[in-house]
Image (cartoon, rainbow, N blue to C red):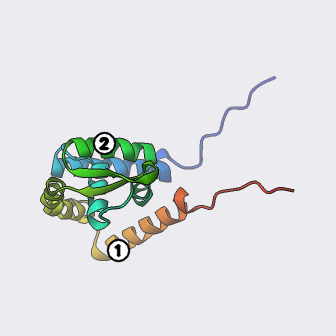
């Protein structure tokens, strides 16, 4: 009995959406560190930015807002609290309310011009129409594929 030789996919690796999305993420993280250094990570920035925009949010809601699992969010929040950038207040039922400290606000404000520089640097190879279309499609892709937006399958009793 002979085994069939597996067929290669009809498209090249560099044409696969997953590969291109991974490369785009690598590029974005590299640009982030190029502009801001390594004292703040992109996820830490997302937490600081979200706490600035939603002060006093609880840790579980924060995780949902930034699309990160709750245990990773808790770990990162602990590190940000140790740096003195956020305050975690214990609420009933072991929930935690999070807010920026003045030091956290200063870090975030210090990043503002770099964020704009980074955004423009990533997008400047596209013309204005392409930039708008790229962002429209990226938002649509994320929205349509976001696991948090998909209904949870619940077994039905028969």
The residue lying toward the viewer, choosing from 19 and 9, is 19
Relative to 6, 23 lies left or right:
left
Task: Please state, as top left, top right, bottom left or bottom right, where the N terminus lies in the image.
Answer: top right
Residue at the far bottom: name it: 129
Q: Which residue in the protein does label 2 denote?
A: 78
Which percent across, then down, holds residue 115? 20, 60
Q: In the displayed structure, does residue 113 sit left or right of residue 17?
A: left
Question: Nearer the N terminus, badge 2 or badge 1?
Answer: 2
Residue placed furthest toward the front: 92
Callout 2–callout 1 Cβ contact below 8 Å: no
The image shows residue 25 at horizontal and vertical percentages of: 36, 50
Residue 15 or residue 83, whichever sits in front: 83
Quarter occupied by the C terminus: bottom right
Determine whether 107 is above or below 3 in the image. Answer: below
Secondary structure type for disc 1? helix
Vertical relation: 9 (above or below) 111: above
Q: Quadrant of residue 150?
A: bottom right
Q: Callout 1: 10 Å neighbours few (<14), some, many (20+)?
A: few
Residue 152 picture location, percent across and down = 64, 57
Q: Which of the two residues, 86 or 39, is positioned nearer the viewer here?
A: 86
Per the image, label 2 sits on a secondary structure element best described as helix
Compared to residue 158, the image places residue 140 above or below, namely: below
Write the residue at 43% across / 43% down: 71
Identify the residue position indicated by label 1 in the image: 132
Tell me where residue 109 appears, x and y as whole percent: 15, 61
């Amino acid at each position: 009995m002979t085994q069939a030789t597996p067929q290669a996919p009809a498209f090249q690796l560099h044409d696969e959406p997953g590969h291109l999305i991974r490369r785009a993420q690598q590029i974005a993280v590299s640009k982030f560190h190029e502009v801001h250094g390594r004292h703040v990570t992109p996820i830490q920035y997302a937490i600081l930015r979200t706490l600035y925009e939603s002060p006093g949010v609880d840790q579980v809601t924060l995780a949902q807002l930034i699309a990160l699992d709750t245990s990773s969010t808790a770990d990162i929040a602990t590190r940000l609290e140790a740096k003195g950038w956020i305050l975690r207040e214990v609420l009933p039922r072991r929930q935690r309310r999070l807010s920026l400290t003045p030091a956290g606000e200063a870090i975030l404000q210090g990043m503002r011009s770099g964020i704009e520089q980074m955004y423009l640097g990533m997008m400047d190879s596209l013309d204005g129409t392409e930039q708008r279309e790229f962002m429209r499609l990226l938002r649509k892709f994320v929205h349509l594929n976001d696991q948090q937006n998909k209904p949870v399958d619940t077994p039905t009793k028969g």
